[in-house]
Amino acid sequence: MRGLHRPYSEAVRQHSTLAAAFAAVLLVTGFLAVMQLRTERNIRQILGVPSSRLEEFGYRLARVEAGRRNLEQEVETLRERVAAMRRLSIDGRAGGIALNAEIEELSALTGLTAVQGPGIVIEIRDSTRPLPAGADPNDVLVHYTDLQSVVNELWAAGAEAVAVNGERFTVGSSIRCVGTTVLVNGRRMAPPFRIQAIGDPGVLAAYLGRPQGVVAYLRVFGFPVITTRPGRIFIPPYGGPLRSGSPPIAH
């Protein structure tokens, strides 16, 4: 009988332990159930939301949170793009200003815009010397070649803009004659011929006053040539037609 008593007692103790553990599990489960019921009751009373829809609301909330994070990332991307576009705009504006300045400079050099500045004015008249009997009257007239020579020397001296009797010279300008009539850009000219040149007045006057220059040659043959240095010279833009392939004046 003693041999059977110990296993029986051990079994009883194990049963008691299992029963206590089971009771503890039931107690915890009951506590959680009570807490859940209280929470659901509070939600129903405070929010008026049925407990059966809490899972659905939780799912929706998770989706809204995910959407918000995506929008935040998109906003950050858009901000970076706006900053990049602003930088490009600033660079483009600076480039546009520089390009516009270059266009204006080229337009002035090609005679398409009016210019003003220091320079000199050369006035040339027909010769006043008396003609001998039987001499050619053309010998005392200013010819287109004389004007062309003066203009070429002005370009060679560094003139920035030139005009004859208000007619602006461009790379396509020319001086011609028809009989005794001088044509500049197709416009008829008559003496006195007034040539305006913008540039360094001292340099231009010195170059034209060379002993071997065209002005000295004209004066030898009695052609009055007067050079003045106005404070400021205004030269209008070229007003003739623009034609491709127009021959430049000889330099």
Image (cartoon, rainbow, N blue to C red):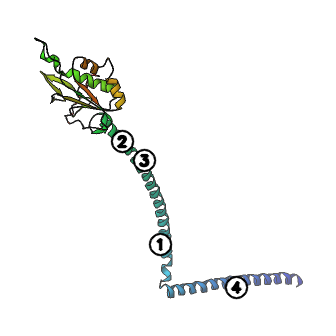
**How far apart, in angstroms, are the residues tagged by discs 1 and 3?**
46 Å
Q: Which mark is nearer the camera, 2 or 4?
A: 2
Question: N-terminal of the two: label 1 or label 3?
Answer: 1
- How far apart marks 1 and 2 lie (CA) works out to 60 Å
Tell me the tag on residue 91: 3
Residue drawn 30% across and 36% down? 230
Q: For the residues marked 2 and 4, what is the alpha-carbon distance in whole angstroms?
A: 94 Å
Residue name at image x 20 percent, y 36 percent: 239
Whichever of labels 1 and 4 marks the residue nearer the N terminus, that label is: 4
Identify the mark at residue 101; answer none if there is no mark.
2
Nearest-to-viewer mark from 4 and 3: 3
Extreme residue in the top direction: 134
Which residue is labeled 4 in the image?
A: 23
Q: Secondary structure at mark 2?
A: helix
Position of residue 178 measured from the top left corner of the image (x, y, whole percent): 13, 23
Nearest-to-viewer mark from 1 and 2: 2
Q: Circle 1 is placed at which residue position?
A: 60
Q: In this view of the protein, which residue sits in the foreground, 107 or 21?
A: 107
- The three-letter code of the residue at mark 1 reads Arg
- Are there few (<14), some (14-19), or many (20+) residues within 10 Å of tag 2? few
Neighbours of disc 3 within 10 Å: few (<14), some (14-19), many (20+): few
Pointer 2 and pointer 4: residues touching (CB < 8 Å)?
no
